[in-house]
């Protein structure tokens, strides 16, 4: 395609032309995109038409001198709808063939033209000042494209172009072909493909000004499928339509696409062998489907055909739409009335009453509606006498006796009857009526009713007793010369018997009890006949009147229900149903709760719907049992009773519950492993699996375990009070519900002390140590001490000190305090008392049943100084020969098993309290003392000349005696 830029040189604007230097350069250019390209029917011309165009400009040039100095140019592009953003539509600079000044001059010379020359932008060359491209207005067209202000390139914008919506909008705004204001132009030509987007572009600055009209033709793509305006299409075809009859199908399919993408063809899914489809196109290009009849139709054989009509466009791939096509076959009057028989024979007795039905004729017409209407009439051949005697209903075809048969009436009548249909030859049937003369009159039956009778119906109550009289019947013979018999024909609780002493009188009475529910209506026949065989019948209808003799009956005498607890208020339980065999109001049932029903159960008296107005709690009450009544509306009313049994089903709405929040157990130490400490009692108010409880230890599970079945708490290992005196456990109880609920309890285990630890001597620290005692020590002065502790508590930790063995120059010179362990000098030391003293001290507790003890050797060296330590050490290493004195300390407390009076407990408790307080004070004081001794150890060694010398002995005098004890669980 070629882009054209036109400029006019007129007198008076030569200066401006020289300034703009506009050049007109026809040039063939190929667009970079297939979807958007430039074409120029208005803005381009071929080189062979160039001389004609120049002559035209020479002719009209003077008239253009009055025009503006600006230049107007049109550019045409085309692109497909639905393109994404950023697709290049065209470059205005390139398509307008804007080139710089030098290049344009050369091009103008080469072309031999005298056109004004403008400075244009070209690759590799710049404008000074640069060109600027902008849209003249931001109308509807500017929403779909973006214009680069510097390069002049047009691209698609983020708003997708929908040709169908755009052309509809532009057509509405721009009319048939203007569209300048809205920016959309819809062609008014016969081609439906012309949809043009209009843009006005300004090229600045002012000295290079140019006004460019850009027209972008939007090409249609096949993005819409044909669609019928209705889903059900009906076509009516007369059944006598000849072959090749053409019927237009209303509501053809619509396709917003145009051209080949619009609707191209139609077809049927099933042609049923008698139809085909054709498509006709009018001068506007619209295609209409026509239904063509290809075979004979018969409504009486088939009155309707249903198929699918499919519309298909010409896109690639093609798109389709469908609708249901119903072809109805309309009726025509192509059938006439017909009789199944040609003749019928009828017999009538001469004594037949007026209005007696003699015969009935019926013809059939297979057509519909008015085409099938039949009327009956006598043929003109039927004598008037027969017409007067027998009446023919023209609608129903029923023949009745119109007047009483006389003695001189013909015995045979031939009735020719015509069946007339619209536009048809009448069908003919012949009815031969034979009249039989009656020589004797039949018997007569005269009823006289005893029970209530209305219009031939006798009414009896169902509670009437047996032998209730119903009616008298008098049997008469009109000839008075024949014997007449009478009997009852028909089943029922009735009997007909002669009524004595009268002749020809019969009494009708009940033979059984009547029951309305078993049979409410009886039809019995009284038959009378004479000896000549003539008989007569009298039909009697007996209606049984209902009484309230039936109570309502529940479908189930015991109604068992179940409902989950915590139900919603007014929850539905069941709908009671009772039936009453009585009729009318006597059978209407109302429902009531029994007196034993709780107040929160509600029963609708009309519908029988049973509800509960409040929440039920299974733990509060699991089963409910009460009565309900069904009462009818009779007088007096009758009722029946049923029992409702409701079971409240459990839900897991209760957590396990410990009987105590805190459990405390006292256990003696050294308790054997897996021994029974105590039972953890827990309950769960729920039932079944929801009430199953599993116990587990949350902490200390490495030491303690719980037997889930019995709740027994056990210790896995033996417990030592001296290592830990108490344990605090948390036990969790989890039920078996979904979801599971749980609770916890605190378990405190206190270990009771047993005497399992002998006293531990802390000072002196060794049997080989010794202490220097100066001879000048005054009697009564403390020399040293023995300090021991006991890990037990109570009486098991009360310690007594005693000297059980002595050796030395005068061993009795020293004594030990049994309570404090202080060793004091009893007598004044003499010259001959110098030497080494060895005291075997026994440290014993007051445990029960057997106290435990330890021993320690206290070495005292009486001398003024220590001059030969090796000598002293040799003495200490020698095995001492000490005789053991079995002398108990003075403060020892012997356990007693004597029974004491209740009043003696008070001093004992006071004594125990004092001893416990003293023990605590003693332990605290000993701790302070040890700390002080360690701090002054070095100082005391210098001042008191205390020397600790290791001793070697064969005997281990620091002995621990233990005696096994039986420990029971407390």
Image (tube, rainbow, N blue to C red):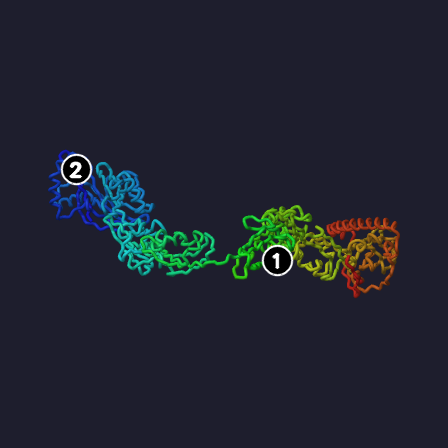
Q: Which residue is mark 2?
A: 17
Say what secondary structure mark 2 lies in.
Answer: helix
Of the 4 image quadrants, the one containing the C terminus is bottom right
**Res. 141 visible in picture:** no
Camera-side residue: 129 or 547?
547
Res. 497 mark: 1
Q: Residue 927, relative to residue 533: is it above or below? A: above
Q: Residue 637, relative to residue 881: is it above or below? A: above
**Res. 800 visible in picture:** yes
Q: Pointer 2: residues within 10 angstroms few (<14), some, or many (20+)?
A: many
Q: CA distance from mark 2 to mark 1?
A: 142 Å
Query: Farthest residue toward the bottom?
Result: 954
Res. 697 mark: none
Seen in the image, is 185 located left or right of residue 363? left
Q: Position of residue 328 (x, y in %)?
A: 34, 54
Seen in the image, is 405 located left or right of residue 948? left
Say what secondary structure mark 1 lies in.
Answer: strand
The residue mark sitting in front, 2 or 1, is: 1
Q: Position of residue 449 (x, y in %)?
A: 59, 50
Q: Position of residue 63 (x, y in %)?
A: 14, 36
Mark nearer the N terminus (2 vs 1): 2
Camera-side residue: 192 or 140?
192
Q: Number of marks in the image?
A: 2
Query: Farthest residue toward the front?
Result: 481
Tag 2–tag 1 contact (CB < 8 Å): no
Camera-side residue: 413 or 377?
413
The picture quadrant where one finds residue 841 is bottom right
């Amino acid at each position: 395609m070629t882009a054209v830029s036109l400029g006019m040189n007129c007198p008076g604007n030569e200066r401006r032309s020289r300034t703009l230097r506009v050049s007109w350069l026809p040039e063939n250019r190929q667009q970079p995109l297939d979807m958007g390209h430039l074409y120029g029917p208005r803005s381009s011309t071929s080189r062979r038409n160039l001389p004609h165009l120049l002559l035209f400009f020479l002719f009209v040039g003077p008239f253009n001198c009055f025009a503006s100095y600006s230049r107007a140019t049109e550019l045409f592009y085309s692109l497909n709808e639905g393109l994404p953003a950023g697709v290049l539509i065209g470059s205005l600079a390139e398509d307008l063939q804007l080139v710089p000044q030098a290049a344009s001059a050369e091009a103008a010379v080469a072309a031999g033209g005298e056109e004004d020359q403008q400075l244009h932008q070209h690759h590799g060359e710049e404008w000074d000042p640069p060109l600027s491209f902008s849209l003249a207005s931001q109308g509807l067209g500017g929403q779909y494209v973006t214009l680069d202000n510097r390069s002049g390139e047009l691209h698609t914008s983020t708003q997708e172009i929908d040709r169908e919506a755009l052309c509809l909008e532009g057509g509405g705004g721009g009319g048939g072909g203007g569209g300048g204001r809205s920016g959309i132009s819809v062609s008014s030509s016969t081609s439906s493909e012309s949809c043009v987007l209009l843009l006005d572009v300004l090229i600045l600055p002012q000295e290079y000004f140019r006004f460019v009209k850009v027209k972008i033709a939007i090409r249609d793509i096949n993005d819409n499928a044909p669609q019928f305006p209705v889903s059900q299409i009906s076509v009516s075809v007369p059944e006598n339509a000849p072959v090749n009859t053409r019927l237009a199908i209303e509501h053809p399919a619509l396709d917003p696409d145009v051209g080949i993408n619009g609707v191209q063809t139609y077809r049927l899914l099933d042609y049923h062998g008698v139809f085909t489809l054709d498509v006709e196109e009018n001068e506007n290009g619209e295609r209409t489907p026509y239904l063509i009849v290809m075979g004979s139709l018969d409504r009486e054989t088939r009155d309707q055909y249903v198929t699918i009509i499919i519309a298909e466009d010409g896109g690639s791939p093609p798109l389709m739409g469908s609708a249901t096509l119903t072809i109805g076959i309309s009726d025509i009057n192509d059938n006439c009335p017909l009789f199944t028989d040609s003749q019928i024979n009828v017999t009538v007795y001469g004594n037949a009453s007026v209005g007696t039905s003699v015969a009935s004729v019926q013809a059939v017409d297979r057509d519909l509606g008015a085409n099938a209407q039949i009327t009956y009439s006598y043929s003109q051949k039927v004598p008037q006498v027969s017409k007067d005697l027998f009446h023919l209903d023209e609608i129903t075809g029923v023949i009745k006796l119109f007047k009483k048969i006389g003695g001189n009436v013909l015995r045979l009548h031939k009735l020719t009857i015509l069946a007339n249909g619209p536009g048809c030859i009448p069908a003919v049937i012949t009815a031969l009526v034979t009249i039989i003369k009656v020589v004797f009159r039949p018997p007569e039956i005269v009823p006289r009713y005893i029970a209530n009778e209305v219009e031939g119906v006798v009414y009896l109550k169902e509670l009437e007793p047996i032998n209730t009289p119903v009616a008298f019947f008098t049997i008469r013979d009109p000839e008075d010369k024949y014997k007449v018999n009478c009997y009852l024909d028909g089943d029922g609780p009735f009997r007909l018997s002669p009524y004595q002493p009268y002749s020809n009188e019969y009494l009708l009475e009940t033979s059984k009890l009547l029951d309305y529910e078993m049979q409410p209506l009886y039809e019995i026949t009284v038959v009378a006949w004479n000896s000549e065989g003539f008989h007569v019948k009298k039909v009697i209808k007996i209606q049984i009147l209902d009484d309230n003799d039936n109570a309502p009956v529940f479908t189930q005498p015991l109604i068992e229900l179940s409902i989950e607890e915590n139900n919603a208020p007014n929850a539905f339980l069941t709908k009671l149903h009772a039936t009453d065999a009585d009729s009318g109001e006597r059978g209407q049932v109302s429902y009531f709760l029994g007196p034993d029903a709780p107040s929160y159960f509600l029963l609708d008296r009309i519908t029988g719907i049973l509800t509960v107005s409040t929440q039920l709690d299974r733990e509060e009450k699991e089963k409910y049992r009460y009565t309900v009544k069904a009462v009818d509306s009779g007088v007096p009313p009758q009722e029946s009773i049923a029992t409702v049994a409701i079971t409240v089903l459990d839900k897991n709405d209760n957590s396990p519950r410990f009987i105590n929040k805190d459990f405390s157990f006292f256990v003696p130490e050294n308790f054997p492993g897996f021994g029974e400490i105590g039972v953890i009692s827990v309950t769960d108010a729920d039932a079944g699996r929801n009430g199953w409880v599993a116990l587990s230890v949350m902490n200390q599970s490495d030491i303690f375990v719980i037997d889930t079945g019995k709740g027994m708490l056990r210790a896995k290992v033996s417990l030592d009070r001296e290592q830990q005196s108490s344990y605090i456990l948390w036990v969790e109880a989890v039920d078996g519900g979904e979801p599971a609920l749980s609770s916890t309890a605190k378990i405190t285990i206190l270990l009771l002390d047993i005497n399992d630890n002998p006293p531990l001597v802390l000072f002196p620290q060794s049997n080989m140590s010794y202490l220097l005692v100066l001879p000048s020590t005054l009697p009564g002065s403390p020399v040293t001490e023995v300090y021991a502790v006991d890990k037990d508590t109570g009486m098991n930790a009360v310690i007594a000190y005693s000297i059980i063995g002595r050796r030395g120059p005068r061993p009795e010179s020293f004594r030990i305090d049994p309570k404090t362990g202080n060793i004091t000098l009893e007598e004044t030391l003499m010259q001959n008392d110098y030497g080494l003293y060895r005291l075997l001290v026994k440290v014993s507790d007051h445990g029960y049943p057997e106290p435990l003890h330890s021993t320690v050797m206290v070495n005292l060296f009486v001398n003024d100084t220590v001059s030969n330590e090796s000598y002293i050490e040799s003495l200490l290493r020698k095995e001492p020969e000490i005789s053991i004195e079995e002398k108990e300390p003075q403060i020892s407390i012997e356990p007693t098993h004597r029974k004491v009076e209740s009043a003696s407990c008070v001093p004992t408790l006071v004594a125990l309290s004092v001893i416990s307080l003293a023990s605590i004070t003693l332990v605290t004081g000993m701790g302070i003392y040890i700390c002080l001794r360690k701090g002054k150890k070095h100082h005391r060694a210098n001042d008191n000349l205390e020397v600790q010398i290791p001793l070697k002995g064969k005997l281990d005098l620091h002995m621990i005696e233990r005696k096994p004890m039986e420990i029971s669980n407390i």
